[in-house]
């Protein structure tokens, strides 16, 4: 199994973390999940990156860029995923 280069720091109870993980999974983007409630080194890194704040999700990319609490649009832009796909029309 290939190790992901994207590191996602978050918690299991965080709605934004769940949304970001869902976005990455739905777009088949591999990532490593670090639960900072269980990984104290990860928690300390989040505090360091976010100037003493426990802001999650904090996502670190292989190119060194970091997104903190990104929206789906920000994630889509990072991966060049178009977000303006037309809605499906359903007939009645």
Image (tube, grey):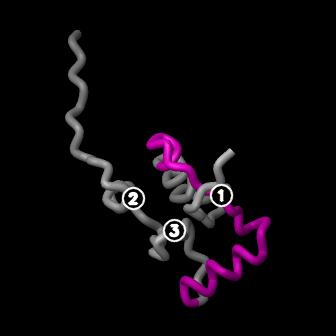
Depth check, mark 3 against mark 2: the one in front is 3
Q: Residue at x 65, y 54 (%)?
A: 3
Residue placed under numbered mark 3 in the picture: 62
Q: What segment carries the magenta color?
A: 24-51
C-alpha distance separating marks 1 and 2: 16 Å
Residue furthest bottom as drawn? 51
Q: Residue 19 at what x, y percent from top left?
A: 50, 51
Q: Is residue 50 above or below residue 36?
A: below
C-alpha distance separating marks 3 and 2: 14 Å
Nearest the eye: 2 or 44: 2
- Which tag, 3 or 2, sits closer to the chain's start? 3
Residue placed under numbered mark 1 in the picture: 33
Depth check, mark 1 against mark 3: the one in front is 3
Q: Residue at x 61, y 87 (%)?
A: 48
Residue placed under numbered mark 2 in the picture: 75
Say left or right for 44 vs 67.
Answer: right
User: Do the CB atoms of the residues marked 1 and 2 lie less than 8 Å apart?
Assistant: no
Q: Residue 80 at what x, y percent from top left?
A: 31, 54
Label 1: few (<14), some or many (≥20) within 10 Å? some
């Amino acid at each position: 199994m290939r190790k992901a280069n994207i590191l996602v720091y978050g918690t299991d109870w965080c709605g934004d973390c769940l949304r970001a993980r869902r976005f990455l999974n739905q777009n088949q983007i591999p990532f490593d999940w670090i639960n900072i409630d269980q990984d104290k080194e990860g928690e300390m890194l989040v505090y360091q990156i976010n100037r003493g704040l426990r802001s999650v999700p904090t996502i670190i990319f292989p190119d060194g860029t970091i997104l903190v609490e990104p929206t789906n649009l920000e994630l889509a832009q990072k991966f060049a995923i178009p977000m303006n796909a037309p809605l499906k029309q359903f007939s009645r």
